[in-house]
């Protein structure tokens, strides 16, 4: 597998970054990965499975308003909606994978991005894996708190900006924030790729525009794909921890059951960081699913 290449696509004043890991010897379908809120497109690199690197090409697409992706001008309520969001995934994919089928894997907001794309552009998607993903964007826990402060004016705005300022000061504060997403804290801290992943994404996190992140947290409250759920007929694996403190477990189970071709994997005692809290079960589920739908 060659060294990754960074590229950009533009749409609706958004400039979206993508990483491509090309593999001339690939004999399986490519996989497109989309990270979660506040992370970066480098999120997947340290822990990418050897089987993926050996057998496939794989790509990582940045969420909007996540460095090195940018937005030209002042972000407003009209700067992002479900149609624009889907196009911000479609443009990089069309550039990176012009032809053929591929798998989509998304974490949290990345899971929403995958489902949103599939509802509007299903033709080439072989399957989807949604990891702690959602169909409606109202969160709980730390993200729910940030949503609350993102909606306010002077005082709430100051708290939101202060929280982000702190997290952008040092990778240690980013690591502390990660603990709020887990339930198996000891397993998370033992996860060998935790620190390498945080170190990999932190240079981008430091440059995320705080005003843009605040706007995105507000936009989350308006996200709702439930009116399009019946349009998603692709195979979808929903992976959820039954103690997820961020995205309600019942919501994840309910939308998985409503999907026409959905499969629900419940991980007992796990929070929102399934790949680190239950790494063996998660790895087996992901690799088996991809092989099944190649």
Image (tube, helix red, strand yellow):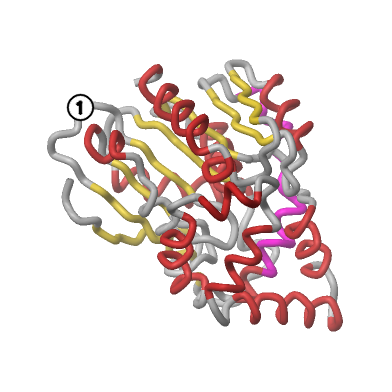
Q: Which residue is drawn at 36% across and 53% down?
A: 45
Q: Position of residue 46 (x, y in %)?
A: 37, 54
Q: In this view, does 172 lie above or below 8?
A: below
Helix, strand or loop status at disc 1: loop
Identify the residue position indicated by label 1 in the image. Answer: 27
Relative side of 122 to 92, left or right: right
Q: Position of residue 250 (x, y in %)?
A: 79, 31
The quarter in which the C terminus is drawn is: top left
Relative side of 122 to 166, left or right: left
Q: Residue at x 66, y 62 (%)?
A: 216
Q: Residue 215 magenta-drawn?
A: yes
Where does the magenta region start and end? Answer: 214-231
Quarter location, residue 74: bottom right
The foreground one among 222 and 202 is: 202
Q: Residue 168 magenta-drawn?
A: no
Relative side of 57 to 231, left or right: left
Number of numbered discs visible in the structure rendering: 1
Quarter location, residue 236: top right
Q: Position of residue 26 (x, y in %)?
A: 19, 33
Q: Which residue is drawn at 17% across and 45% down?
A: 1
Q: Is residue 116 above or below residue 168?
A: above
Relative side of 22 to 109, left or right: left
Q: Where is residue 6 in the image (x, y as percent from the top left)?
A: 29, 61
Mainly helix, strand or loop, the magenta region? helix
Q: Which residue is drawn at 43% across and 44% down?
A: 33
């Amino acid at each position: 597998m060659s060294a990754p290449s960074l590229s950009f696509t533009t749409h609706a004043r958004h400039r979206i970054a993508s990483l491509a890991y090309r593999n001339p010897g690939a004999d399986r379908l490519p996989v497109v990965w989309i990270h979660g809120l506040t992370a970066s497109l480098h999120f997947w690199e340290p822990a990418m499975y050897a089987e993926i690197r050996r057998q496939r090409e794989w790509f990582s697409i940045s969420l909007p308003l996540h460095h090195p992706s940018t937005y030209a001008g002042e972000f407003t309520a009209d700067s992002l909606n479900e149609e624009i969001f889907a196009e911000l995934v479609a443009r990089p994919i069309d550039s990176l994978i012009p032809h053929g089928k591929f798998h989509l894997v998304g974490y949290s907001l990345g899971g929403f991005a995958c489902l949103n794309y599939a509802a509007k552009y299903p033709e080439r998607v072989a399957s989807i894996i949604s990891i702690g993903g959602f169909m409606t964007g109202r969160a709980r826990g730390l993200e729910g708190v940030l949503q609350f402060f993102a909606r306010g004016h002077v005082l709430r705005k100051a708290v939101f900006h202060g929280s982000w300022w702190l997290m952008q000061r040092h990778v240690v504060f980013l690591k502390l924030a990660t603990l709020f997403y887990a339930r198996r804290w000891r397993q998370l801290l033992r996860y060998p790729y935790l620190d390498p992943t945080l170190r990999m994404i932190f240079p981008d996190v430091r440059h995320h525009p705080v005003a843009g992140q605040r706007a995105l947290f507000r936009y989350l409250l308006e996200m709702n794909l439930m009116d399009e759920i019946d349009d998603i007929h692709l195979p979808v694996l929903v992976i959820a921890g039954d103690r997820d403190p961020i995205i309600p477990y019942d919501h994840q189970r309910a939308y998985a059951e409503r999907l026409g071709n959905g499969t629900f994997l419940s991980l007992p005692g796990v929070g929102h960081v399934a790949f680190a809290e239950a790494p063996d079960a998660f790895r087996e589920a992901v690799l088996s699913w991809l092989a099944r739908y190649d």
